[in-house]
Image: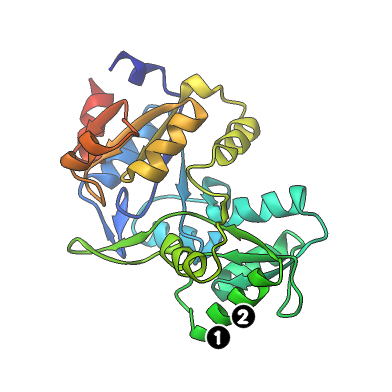
Amino acid sequence: MSKMGNIELFILDLDGTIYFENQLIDGALDFIKTLSRKNIKYLFLTNNSSISKSNYVEKLEALGIPCQDEDIYSSGGVTGIFLSKYRKGKNVFLVGTKALSKELTNYGIEITKENPDIVLVGYDRELDYNKLELACFFLEEGAEFIATNPDLLYPIKNKRYLPDCGSICKMLTTATKKEPLFIGKPNRYIIDIIVDELSVSHDRVAMVGDRLYTDIALGKNAGIFTVLVLSGETDEGMVYQSKHKPDLVVSSVKELTNLINK
């Protein structure tokens, strides 16, 4: 608990932590206001690669949370950074949304449907069978398999879920026997980018999220403080069974506000 007083930057998951679809989780706005009042930095980190930074900014502002482009880090954007640095000149067949395609092209990534070097999978709410068929063909022909994030489920209201990027990847792995390289959470690469850009040391950063295998695993991989909220995918029973143990478990960010105010 004493660790909380040393935190200079809160990295906040969105889906299941701050909101469900278009509804704020109870206490989320007050939590953000508390951080601002105490001059504690925060940013939003999401594995949802289906929409762009500008979409997130619009959504958060519509929900009453002040936000700018530089406050948003997504698995799609970080994948664009990764490809531009470590797969320079490689072209991509994309199983993803038009918004993700546009974000990738902003990083100079060439999107193609012919002889790609890489098959890239994101959370694709525009998915059709033709994309899956082409992805299987290209993977079998030797294309590298990369994915934005390993999340199996995307949370929506009333404890319901939709298949996320990880579930799409499982279909392709079943068909081709190829496993993807995941770029977003829990790959520590995304945290190293953030702390470098913001000049914050790892021991002054906290990751807050609702998923053990992405949010908490990311924090552990990166050596930062981890806070699990039980407002999303994870319940207490899952915590005991998981190898990814959070430093702190709270019911929601509303409870976290109380701890910060102590």
Numbered mark located on residue 33 in the image: none
Which residue occupies the foreground of this view, 135 or 193?
A: 135
Number of labels in the image equals: 2
Farthest residue to the right: give it: 89
Res 134 label: 2
Horizontal relation, residue 70 to residue 35: left or right = right
Q: Please, is residue 164 above or below residue 25 in the view?
A: below
| Residue ID at (19%, 60%) | 159
- Residue 41 visible to the viewer: no
Please state the horizontal and vertical placement of residue 188, each as a whole percent of the image.
55, 37
Nearer the observer, 259 or 30: 259
Q: Secondary structure at mark 2?
A: helix
Point out the residue furthest to the top here: 2
Q: Which residue is mark 1?
A: 130
Q: Residues within 10 Å of mark 1 (few under 14, many from 20)?
A: few
Q: CA distance from mark 2 to mark 1?
A: 6 Å
Report the residue at 58% width, 47% height from top. Answer: 70
Is residue 106 shown to the viewer in this render? yes
Q: Of residues 162 and 98, which is closer to you in this image?
A: 162
Model colouring? rainbow
Q: Determine which quarter of the picture holds residue 15.
A: bottom left
* Residue type for callout 2: Leu
Quarter of the image where the N terminus is located: top left
- Please state the horizontal and vertical placement of residue 193, each as a whole percent of the image: 62, 38
Q: Quadrant of the C terminus?
A: top left
Q: Secondary structure at mark 1?
A: helix
